[in-house]
């Protein structure tokens, strides 16, 4: 007789349908008490309890049910080795052909506010052990941990009378993939070490993406099973499938606007902010952001830190955006207006920035660091001229933007609106010239300049003075030639301060 061991935490219709199928195909089902009661109650008759196989009752409040030679022998026996078969026959152990397991919900429970002793009870021991045993013996045993695989197993049993080796091998791989993620989540919860000896964070695939960085590259998006975060729980309400680049840019745009309490708007293109502004209301924030760089905004990603109004939706529809990102629920009349644009991807985002670690993959390894979330507004004036109050606000607004611009990064702002952004250059003077020239196209007075790192020479100050409109500069300081830059500022009548904090973004 063929046998299937079924022991699941989540009992649902899919499981019931699969159990009916197995019974119809002549399988005897072996189950732990909870699953046994559920299946028996719903009409499964060819079923016995695990305790009837082990001749031993569940003990320790259910902690010990299936860990027994009569169970593991039936799963692990290699059918092609005569000695294995004789061994289990001599001990009257039944062969088990299919193992269906779902674990205690540690992934879900770790995010709930429950005490340490309670969450320990959701660390599954027997389930992972059973699945690993079945997966190890995939040459003969079918291991199932995903409801979506029931249909594949049913189809092959119907056609061939059993599952194929290729399917069993694939399902075994899924088992070890899942148990690794499960163990990783438990490890991180217990260890609570930012930089552990072994790095094995757990991620679950959320969506297959339209394509990667380029159309010929396939890509998928994974979310953390361990940490919560803004980009983990967003919802797409409209538009084409997201691409790899869309999600990268969404992440940057949301991080920029999330720094501000006033209505904020940010446009991102190729992972770099091209326009950022605050406003008295969301419409003003949008108008100032779009004015900051209307050319680069074409086909960009635009994010807001507050809900989109119908008035704003109408204005947005006059420009071309790839993605629109805003918090919370969109009103129906707002969605109706926005959906007039067939392909725009409308995203609702529901969580704040998680401020977890950042990871950058390199060939053969991965770099891990704390995120650059330092918003300390400490500074030291190093020039004869001091900052005006309005310049201080403008400078620290621009500093929150410069952190997300590729180094060498320069941001020129007027008030709480960027007018010139440049970065990703191999030297700072090129970035400074580009940012200043872009700003001068829109205004020639009351400008401030912020740099992500120190000035190696006085040339950036000279460029700022050439503009005739830059009145204040904020930079980390720390160059061997700081005094040259300070003297240049004094000569030109520009105020400058050092923060002592660098904000490189490579």
Image (cartoon, rainbow, N blue to C red):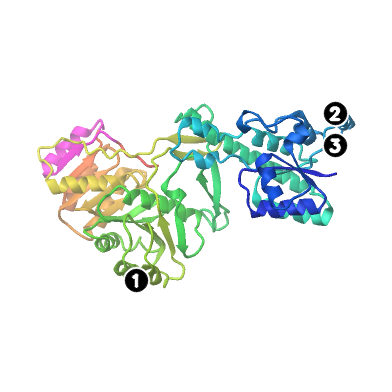
Instruction: Tell me which segment is drawn in magenta.
Output: 478-501
Closer mark to the observer between disc 3 and disc 1: 3
Closer mark to the observer between disc 3 and disc 2: 2
The x, y position of residue 421, in whole percent, is 30, 52
The x, y position of residue 442, in whole percent, is 22, 61
Neighbour class for label 2 at 10 Å: few (<14), some, many (≥20)?
A: few
Question: Which element is circle 3 on?
Answer: loop
In the picture, residue 47 is in which quadrant?
Answer: top right
Question: Which element is circle 1 on?
Answer: loop
Question: Which element is circle 2 on?
Answer: loop
Q: Is residue 497 magenta?
A: yes
How many marks the image carries: the answer is 3
Closer mark to the observer between disc 1 and disc 2: 2
- Residue that numbered label 1 is attached to: 318
What label sits on residue 79 in the rendered view? 3
Q: Is residue 224 magenta?
A: no
Q: Which numbered disc, 3 or 2, marks the residue that appears first in the sequence?
A: 3
- Work out how far the residue at label 3 is from the one at label 2, CA to CA, in angstroms: 16 Å
Q: Which numbered disc, 3 or 1, marks the residue that appears first in the sequence?
A: 3
**In-front residue for pair 449/375:** 375
Residue at 38%, 38% (x, y): give it. Answer: 371
- Work out how far the residue at label 1 is from the one at label 2, CA to CA, in angstroms: 78 Å
Residue 200: in sight, yes or no?
A: no
- Work out how far the residue at label 3 is from the one at label 1, CA to CA, in angstroms: 69 Å
The answer to whether residue 45 is left or right of residue 504 is right
- Compared to 68, does 237 lie above or below? below
What label sits on residue 91 in the rendered view? 2
Viewport quadrant of the C terminus: top left
The answer to whether residue 326 is left or right of residue 45 is left
Residue at 85%, 37% (x, y): give it. Answer: 79
Q: Are marks 3 and 1 in contact (CB under 8 Å)?
A: no
Residue 362: in sight, yes or no?
A: yes
């Amino acid at each position: 007789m063929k046998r299937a061991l079924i022991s699941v935490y989540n009992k649902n219709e899919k499981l019931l349908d699969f159990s009916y199928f197995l019974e119809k195909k002549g399988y005897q089902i072996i189950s732990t008490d909870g699953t046994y009661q559920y299946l028996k109650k719903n009409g499964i008759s060819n079923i016995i309890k695990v305790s009837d196989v082990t001749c031993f009752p569940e003990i320790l409040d259910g902690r010990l049910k299936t860990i027994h030679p009569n169970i593991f022998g039936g799963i692990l026996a290699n059918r092609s080795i005569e000695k294995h078969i004789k061994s289990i026959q001599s001990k009257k152990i039944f062969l088990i052909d299919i193992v269906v397991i779902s674990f205690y919900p540690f992934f879900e429970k770790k995010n709930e506010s429950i005490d340490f002793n309670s969450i320990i009870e959701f660390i599954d021991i027997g389930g992972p052990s059973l699945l690993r045993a079945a997966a190890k013996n995939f040459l003969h045993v079918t291991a199932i941990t995903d409801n979506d695989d029931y249909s594949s197993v049913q189809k092959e049993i119907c056609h061939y009378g059993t599952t194929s080796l290729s399917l069993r091998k694939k399902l075994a791989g899924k088992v070890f993939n899942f148990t690794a993620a499960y163990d990783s989540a438990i490890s991180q919860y217990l260890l609570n070490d930012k930089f552990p000896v072994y790095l094995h964070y757990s991620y679950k695939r959320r969506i297959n993406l339209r394509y990667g960085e380029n159309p010929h590259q396939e890509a998928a998006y994974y979310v953390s099973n361990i940490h919560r975060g803004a980009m983990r729980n967003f919802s797409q309400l409209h538009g084409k499938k997201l691409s790899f680049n869309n999600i990268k840019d969404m992440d940057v745009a949301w991080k920029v606007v999330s720094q501000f309490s006033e209505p904020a708007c940010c446009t991102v293109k190729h992972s770099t902010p091209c326009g950022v502004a605050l406003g008295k209301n969301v419409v003003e924030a949008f108008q100032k952001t779009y004015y900051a760089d209307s050319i680069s905004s074409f086909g960009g990603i635009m994010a807001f830190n507050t809900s989109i109004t119908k008035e704003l939706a109408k204005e947005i529809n006059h420009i071309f955006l790839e993605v629109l990102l805003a918090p919370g629920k969109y009103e129906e009349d707002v969605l109706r207006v926005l959906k007039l644009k067939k392909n725009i991807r409308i995203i609702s985002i529901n969580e704040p920035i998680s401020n977890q670690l950042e990871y950058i993959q390199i060939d053969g390894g991965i770099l891990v660091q704390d995120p650059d979330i330092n918003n300390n507004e400490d500074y030291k004036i190093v020039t004869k001229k001091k900052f005006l109050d309005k310049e201080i606000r403008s400078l620290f607004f621009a500093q929150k933007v410069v952190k997300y611009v590729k180094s060498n990064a320069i941001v020129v702002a007027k008030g709480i609106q960027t007018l010139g952004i440049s970065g990703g250059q191999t030297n700072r003077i090129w970035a400074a010239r580009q940012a200043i020239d872009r700003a001068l196209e829109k205004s020639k007075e009351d400008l401030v300049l912020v740099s992500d790192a120190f000035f190696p020479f006085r040339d950036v100050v000279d460029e700022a003075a050439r503009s005739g409109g830059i009145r204040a500069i904020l930079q980390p300081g720390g160059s061997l030639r700081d005094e040259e830059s300070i003297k240049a500022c004094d000569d030109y009548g520009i105020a400058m301060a050092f923060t002592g904090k660098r904000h490189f973004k490579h």
